[in-house]
Amino acid sequence: MNRNTILATLRAESTPWDFIIIGGGATGLGTAVDAASRGYKTLLLEQHDFAKGTSSRSTKLIHGGVRYLAQGNVVLVLEALRERGLLMRNAPHLVRHQAFVVPSYDWWEGPFYGIGMKVYDVLAGKLGLAPSRLLSREETLAQIPTLEPEGLRGGVIYYDGQFDDARLAITLAQTIFDLGGSASNYVKVISLLKANDLVGGVAAQDMETGETFELQARVVINATGAYADAIRRLDDSQVEPIIAPSQGVHLVLDKSFLPGDSAIMVPHTDDGRVLFVVPWHDRAIVGTTDTPINDLPIEPRALPEEIEFLLNHAGRYLTKDPTASEVKSIFAGIRPLVKASDKNETAALSRDHTILISKSGLLTITGGKWTTYRKMAEDTVNQAAILAGLDERPCITPTLRLHGWRDNVESEKSFNIYGIDWSAVRQLINENPIFAERLHENLPYTTAEVIWAIRHEMACTVEDILSRRTRALLLDAKASVAIAPKIAALMASELGHDEHWQKQQVADYGELARGYILV
Ligand SMILES: Cc1cc2nc3c(=O)[nH]c(=O)nc-3n(C[C@H](O)[C@H](O)[C@H](O)COP(=O)(O)OP(=O)(O)OC[C@H]3O[C@@H](n4cnc5c(N)ncnc54)[C@H](O)[C@@H]3O)c2cc1C
């Protein structure tokens, strides 16, 4: 993946793309992988970095959605469980098995959730993981030694998938290139090109240099998540919004709060929410909230009441109450929830995700979740091919191995996020032993991963490295600020930037990271 090569292609290209996809989150990246894998000429444009939006801010679960089961939405759960199974086969290096314990403090909870989880097992069918089972009080505490013992009767253990969201996004971007497609970060779509009232391309701007491009396409696909209405308004300024955004917040705690391998899942807090405490990269993630919001900042911030809810409820289920000063990082994301569709458009499909086609032919795909990105992409490309008048080609992504695929014998335990690329990352150290240097004692990363990200993963800023190529910002926001100057210096030397650039990058990163530090 080389950004300069892609920009040169954008300058030179005179024949239309089959599809231009706007948005480099789960939905857009998945759609571009699907389109490129069917041999369509595909370009994806992302205004910031890949996964800068909601797709790096999830709870990191590849799951059927126990909550949807409780709501009786069996079709949705079936679809998500199938997708969970397919992703585990197609990206075993990026998805691991995760045990969840539902603790029971009331007599009815054990049998009630026990039966629910059996239904979940059955729905997963052949793609199922290990079966769920009831746990005694002692077994529950053996799984989660830091679970609040007072009043505990037992629990239910079940299994789902866990992943690293931003790393899966980078893997999808790499897969697009492997398949002959193109994608660029830091290129923003600023307007839609129209001829005879039909959308026939986009005007886009390189956010690094300000250079603009006019790019033709048979179909433009709007995969901008919570920002979908802004693109729809470029098509029709009067269009009714379809997104009802809702914010979700997570806290990251030290692993000592959840020392074992199992996660806690509380299906129903006293105010009716689902609460997860999940081990992730040697930390514990606590989440989430569900707060309707009006604005759509690219860097959403937790509200005081959300922080209070998470700290209080983590304290309620853990033996040790976490305090604000023990929070390693706090991050928020915006759910692209879809409300009723506009009467002037065709609701081509409406499930968990929604596909809309405007009168002028703009295709919008939104809603859904990370787990179902592949199915969303399949549905989108099916619709887009018909809309473009292209020959219909079958979808091959159910069995398409993603970039770096490696049979991960450890997949039940750990991630191996680089897959087969890991030997090439290690090779950097062989060539230059100084790259083995650990960046910070509280972070698991070495210089080699940074150099790899600059050379092969299109990282352009210090934030790209610390937030999404590595997950330093989420694992320990303060430690990530401490190493920002070192990252800026490495990037400047690799990419040919001057001292002013380094200073600006460090200042920008410090400002951003402030929002992830609680006290
Ligand atoms: C708190 C929370 C927890 C979640 N947890 C889970 C989970 O555990 N498991 C799960 O399966 N799902 C989860 N989800 C859902 C999942 O994260 C989202 O459904 C998914 O990430 C949405 O991806 P997207 O690509 O549609 O949107 P986004 O990731 O927001 O991507 C849209 C992109 O479009 C870009 N863009 C916007 N305008 C332009 C423009 N003009 N030009 C170019 N680019 C543009 C944006 O910069 C952005 O990167 C969670 C969601 C939230 C909020």
Image (cartoon, rainbow, N blue to C red):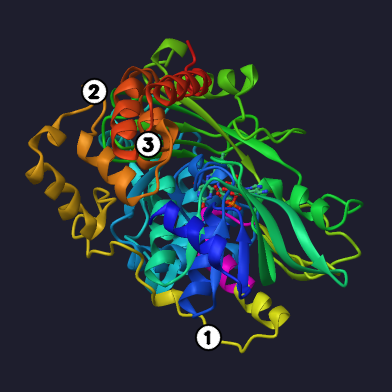
Q: Residues within 10 Å of mark 3 (few under 14, many from 20)?
A: many
x and y percentages locating residue 474 in the rendered image: 41, 30
Residue at 49% x, 15% y is 518
Mark 1 is on which residue type? Pro
Q: Position of residue 467 (x, y in %)?
A: 42, 34
Report the residue at 34% width, 48% height from top. Answer: 99
- Which callout, 2 or 3, points to the residue nearer the camera? 3
- Say whether disc 2 or disc 3 marks the residue closer to the N-terminus: 2
Identity of the amino acid at label 2? His
335, above or below 152, in the image: below
Residue 439 left/right relative to 427: right
CA neighbours of label 1 inside 10 A, class few (<14), some (14 to 19), many (20+) = few
Tell whether label 1 touches label 3 (CB within 8 Å). Answer: no
Q: Measure the alpha-carbon separation of dots 2 and 3.
A: 14 Å
Specify the farthest residue to the bottom. Answer: 391
Q: Give the residue number, with chain letter if any, for mark 2.
A: 440
Which mark, by number, is residue 465?
3
Q: Hey, which quadrant is residue 434 in on the image? A: top left
Q: Which residues are magenta?
A: 367-380
**Which residue is pictured at 31% across the width and 53% down the height?**
96
Closer to the camera, 72 or 445?
445
Determine the secondary structure under disc 1: loop
Choose between 476 and 230: the one closer to the eye.
230
Q: Residues within 10 Å of mark 2 (few under 14, many from 20)?
A: some
Residue 146 appearing in the image: no
Q: Is residue 110 above or below residue 320?
A: below
